[in-house]
Amino acid sequence: MQVGRIADVVQSLQRARAEASEAKRPLGRVLFFIGAGCSRSAGVPLAGEIARDLVTRLAETYRLGSGLTPEQALENLSHKGHFQKPKGHEIDWYSVYDACFQEHYKTPDHARTIFQRAVASANGKINWAHLCLGELVSQGYCSTIITTNFDLLALEGLAAAGVIPVVSDGLESLGRIDGNPIYPQLIQLNGSIHTYRLRNKPDEIEAVAKDDVAAACVRDLVRSTSTIVFIGYAGREKAIMGLLKKALTEFSEKEIFWCSFEGNPSSIGEAAREIIDDNPNARILLNQDADMFFFELCRDLGIGSPRFVRDPLGAIARQSSRIVKPSEHSATHEISMEIDRHSEMLEKLEEFERTNRETHKSQTMLDIAREQRLRGDFKASLNTLTQALSDPNVHANVIDDAADSAFMVAQASQDPSEIAEALRLSRLSASRWETGTFNWAVAQSRLGDALWLAATGHADVALLMSAVEAYEAALGEIDKEDHPNVWARLQDGIGVALMQAADISKDTSLLEKALTALDNALTVRTREKQPIQWAETQCNKAIALFTLGEQKNDVETLRLAAKLQEEALQESTKKLLPTNWAAGTLNLASIYGAIGYLTDDTASLTKSLLLYDELAAEASDSESPSDVAGRLQNKANVIMSLAEINRDTDLCDKATDLLMGAIRTFEELGMEFFADNAKDTLARIARMRTQFLESAKDPSH
């Protein structure tokens, strides 16, 4: 199993649309498979929430109590034999959901009533995820949507984007679906609110598995699809997952992205895990809220917000342009007049919008800049906001947006002048909010990020300590209970900045503080709930201990650092997270190198070199030049230690070659501190080599 990124999904969708354009087809060969998680933010309850409601109703129906909590209701129902008693302390509400329909609400009328009530509770709202999904289809990125949901949000999202799809309302109507479509398709696998049917009974699962039409449809869709994206779906429907698994086993080259709301890869269902493990091009994306996933996806594709939201008048105008007046006849005169009145009203609204934009230019520029940010064009957004900043009465929100855009630009470019601008705007933003407010805390966090970015390229202790101060200021206003992940990120940021400052200044007291901050972060980023984030923070803690062990010449601290790093690598595996694995392996190689240097242990030094060789063999084009130079320098240090133990001039020459390459890169990148450090090591190797040669000539030396 490999962890993917939204950038991977973006590239896959871009390839699919480019291939479609080349083949003169209107739609990319991409299939989105959505589940209940996509509808949650619109107010449609999840299966577990429906189950809680149903058991309280059943308890009242069977006269087992009213006004009970769901847990109490289930306990009473189980005691009377209406449900199996839950195993363990945690109730599996999804299993209760299945049992409700298998044992108590068996008829189609029951199901319709329940699902109509659930949809009604959402009050007809539609969320960002479905609007973006419709936009993706409208712009040719996606050809088919499959949903297991009973609501009509996928259809409404398509309609909002001006798309009228071919619709299959349940497995029974799959025959109308084209495996290689030229028209958009919506497949409501379990039917809709009007016809919904959950197929989780053993006999129903077997019937679906034997349904030739369903199997052929799923097979044709998978065969003709290049990319499948699962989002908001847990993979609980055994019948559907069985059909998918069979097709994906036959066509195993497909790109698959399984987007999980949870942060732990093991949280996904067994059938989903098997699909991911069996497919070489499958990746899992963790911590993916549906709205945020589609927000980031559309941003990185350059789409921005859906046109229905971005330009509501334009959406109405596009629909209005399709209205045709009836042929001339006295009886149709009033119809024509009504259509003309509609057009006049629309023209007045458009004129009002144009006038409003001219009158409120500052707000107009802010709107334009935000749409540019939504499209991922941070440079254009920054340029637009820079014009708005010339107004002395500019609102703090404009400065915040400018600071955000500037930071994104600087982070991507690493250009010193752009980093300086990001820092200037972040400081300005932090100064405009009232101290102690939440907005002020957010601005302080942003300032900490900008200070850290400015410090890392120049090894500037003062900037790093200023970043710590900004993070700590933000932390004072961020409640751990209300915002646990933000709180943990700030603690991790404090720890990283402190250990970097300690590495430069050789101040061990900073390392002790860094370890405290990282331990705080680990109270939220637990291995059980957030294994990826836990491994990242555990890796940072290992680095802090490594630096502490080096500064104190403490072998036991170094051994503890190695232990923590090896534990982190159990989660950040080469297959699951290749980038994190490379960073962790680099740390481990450095730690073993330090242990070998302090103890003259050639076994530790050799293990370090083997890790460096493994890293070189797995190096990718995405590795930055500075990272490559750092790896070369670290490897040279290990070889130098072996040369010193063995008094070997050939090893001195190998270390020298590696250092020369690192120095060239550091100088090209303007990283003087690191270049000077490598030059000091180079001079030491030269002296060592001279001593070895002199000793060889005169053993008395």
Image: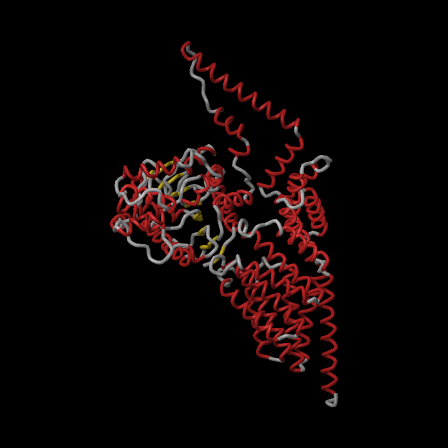
Q: Quadrant of residue 355?
A: top right
Residue 384 rendering spot, x and y as whole percentages:
67, 38
Residue 436 rendering spot, x and y as whole percentages:
65, 46
In which quadrant is the C terminus drawn?
bottom right
In which quadrant is the N terminus drawn?
bottom left
Q: Residue furthest top?
A: 330
Count of labels in the image: 0
124 and 134: which is toward the camera:
124
109 and 130: which is toward the camera:
109
Q: Quadrant of residue 676?
A: bottom right
324 relative to 129, above or below:
above
Residue at x 51% of width, y 62% of height = 572
463 relative to 311, above or below:
below
598 and 642: which is toward the camera:
598
Residue 185 rendering spot, x and y as whole percentages:
39, 39
Left-right relation of 345 to 466: left
Q: Is residue 189 visible?
A: no
349 and 627: which is toward the camera:
349
Query: What colour scheme does the image use?
Result: secondary structure
Q: Is residue 301 visible?
A: yes
Residue at x 45% of width, y 57% of height = 265
Residue 457 rendering spot, x and y as whole percentages:
69, 57
Left-right relation of 309 to 467: left
